[in-house]
Image: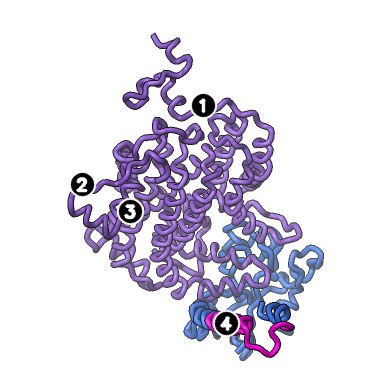
Chain colours: A blue, B purple
Amino acid sequence: MATKAQSAEGPETTGTAGEGEGVRRRDFLNVAAVSFAGVGAVAAIAPLLVQMAPSADVLALATTEVDISKIQPGQGIKAQWRKQPVFIRNLTPKEIQEANAVPMSDLRDPETLAQRTKPGKQNWLITLGVCTHLGCVPLGISEGENRGPYGGYFCPCHGSMYDTAARIRQGPAPKNLFVPDYQFTSPTTVLIGGTDKK
Amino acid sequence: MSFSWAKAYEPKNPFMRWLDERLPLPRLAYGAIGGGYPVPRNLNYFWNFGVLAGIFLTIQIVTGIVLAMHYYATTDGAFTSVNQLIMRDVNAGWLLRYAHMNGASFFFIVTYIHIFRGLFYGSYKAPRELVWMLGLVIYFLMMATAFMGYVLPWGQMSYWGAQVITGFFSAFPLVGEPLRVWLLGGYAPDEAALTRFFSLHYLLPFVIAAVVILHIWALHIPGSGNPTGVDVKTERDTLPFHPFYTAKDGWFAATVLLVYAIVTYFAPNYLGHPDNYIQANPLATPAHIVPEWYFWPFYAILRSFTVDFILPAKLWGVLAMFASILLLFFLPWLDRSPVRSGSYRPVFKRFFWLLVVDVIILGYIGGAPINWWRVALGQAAAAYYFLHFLVILPLVSAFETPLPLPSSISESVLHGEAEEAAPVGQKKPRRGATATAG
């Protein structure tokens, strides 16, 4: 706006401090004041938004160490990480074989068992126990629970079925059960979380 | 307010005159809900439900404020404070809690009847589009408030409801999961989520009250609609709100509050879910998760997408669920028929009742456990819901021949008794009316 006024009046008012220049100064002051207030308002909103993000005490629970020495092949346990259930399962050779026998084209979210486990530790399947559909805890980690037709996990809420590599095979869930970041800190302990970010 | 014959406020005593000259609050009330607001004389009982919704909002705010005095918003304390402290130890706590629980259900019952009243009588049409849209904003805020309120007792259904509903947001690509974590203040519902839900559950009813004021303000510009959909033309078409409609609303409110009291005292848990009397357990999901009954139709739409088609099925479900509410904002422009009332639209009327049946089917499907035929029926009903608003309504309004409308409200009500209706000294018998009168 200011530049337009300048170019229109420029030739006529050269050298004199006419009315046009006064308007331009006021425009500048307006724009500067409103911009300054706008930046201030955005800065003031920032703490109101970031306070909603996970607080330090929540993030402090971001790692969990689990002893897996007592889990026999075919068994599994439910641990807790970031207030969410984690399934730690010791797969039997038969279950590993079943998982590896599935052609990639049959999978909605194609991943091999090897991609979902650590090298040399293919029997340790560690996933979140949170159905990727709407967040229910699937059945199948404890002895005697319904594992569904694919032998992995079965979500009772909306009927999602997972195979022995915890990959989605049937039902509404879009993704395989999420594999969190973890590492073996010793042959019998797993540290879940903590390897990503900080 | 809106008509030239609306009576102006006249203070009855010196104090009211003194007040009115300094702060015209009495004048405002008189013009809005007193003798100064002319209302069509032919309203039927469906026009009582707006006032009823206001009554239930008031009940919810009053019982809610009192309950908040005894409630602990912590994951350790919430369940105990509701089920031990409030239900057993606090004097009359059980009554206040049951009144609040069932008050929410009744608020939704009267609001649904109010909304379907609007759908049948074309209350959303010009010049009342904004009244309709503000009403939808209220409805949306009600759903958010009710959802967060249901989380507060921290039972199993509270917890898993929060998990599933915040899970909707994770359906959106890229921003979904971070958005969900931000909304919850953690990776699963926990302390942070509970306290912020409590804070917002306390705030939103007052926001609703503010939007209710806008809703009524916008309504009072053209004035209330009526069952014929014909505009008010003369003073003979209206009655003052007070005492005529205050009396009618009063007696009807007493009747509905009686039903509310019967449910609250004798079947307080009928509309609830027994699993919510089990404390929240983040490691075990109940076998059959359902939201509260008033969300069932939308839950059915959410669940009716089972196959990925370009986008994942989960995202389709979430988008369809939000769209099912958002499309109602466009209703004034989807239904282009100039005739407001469904009573004079023979084709529209049939489809309206089909829609009612369709929404009831969706509600049933949303509340029932999943099996193959229910999924199929839910999909058909969800498809029909969208078909009704996006295809059937525009087509019907283009091709339908409406029935002849009465020339005025008073004519439609009085059937040739014009002399009786005319104010004294204004007797002008209508053509034909005297011929048949004995």
Left or right, B103 with respect to B229, comes to: left
* Dots 2, 3 in contact, CB < 8 A: no
Q: What residue is disc 1 on? A: B406
Q: Which mark is residue B59?
A: 3
Residue type at tag 1:
Pro
Q: Which residues are magenta?
A: A10-37
Residue B232 image point, x, y percent:
46, 35
Q: Please, which chain is the residue tagged with disc 1 on?
A: B
* Dots 1, 3 in contact, CB < 8 A: no
Does dot 3 land on a helix, a strand or a loop? helix
Residue type at tag 4:
Arg
Q: Please, which chain is the residue tagged with disc 2 on?
A: B
Q: Is residue B30 above or below residue B437?
A: below
Q: Are marks 2 and 3 on the same chain?
A: yes
Q: Quadrant of the C terminus of chain B?
A: top left
Inspect the magenta stretch and tell me whether residue B177 lies in it: no
Q: What residue is disc 4 on? A: A26
Does dot 2 land on a helix, a strand or a loop? loop
**Going 54% across and 75% down the picture, which residue do you hit?**
B182
Residue type at tag 3:
Ile
Distance between mark 4 and mark 3 Cα atoms: 54 Å
Q: Mark 2, residues whose alpha carbon is within 10 Å: few (<14), some, or many (≥20)?
A: few
Q: What residue is disc 2 on? A: B12
Q: Is residue B178 above or below residue B379?
A: below
**Going 67% across and 74% down the picture, which residue do you hit?**
A91
Q: Are marks 2 and 4 on the same chain?
A: no
Q: Mark 1, residues whose alpha carbon is within 10 Å: few (<14), some, or many (≥20)?
A: some
Distance between mark 4 and mark 1 Cα atoms: 61 Å
Q: Please, which chain is the residue tagged with disc 4 on?
A: A
- First in residue order: circle 2 vs circle 3: 2
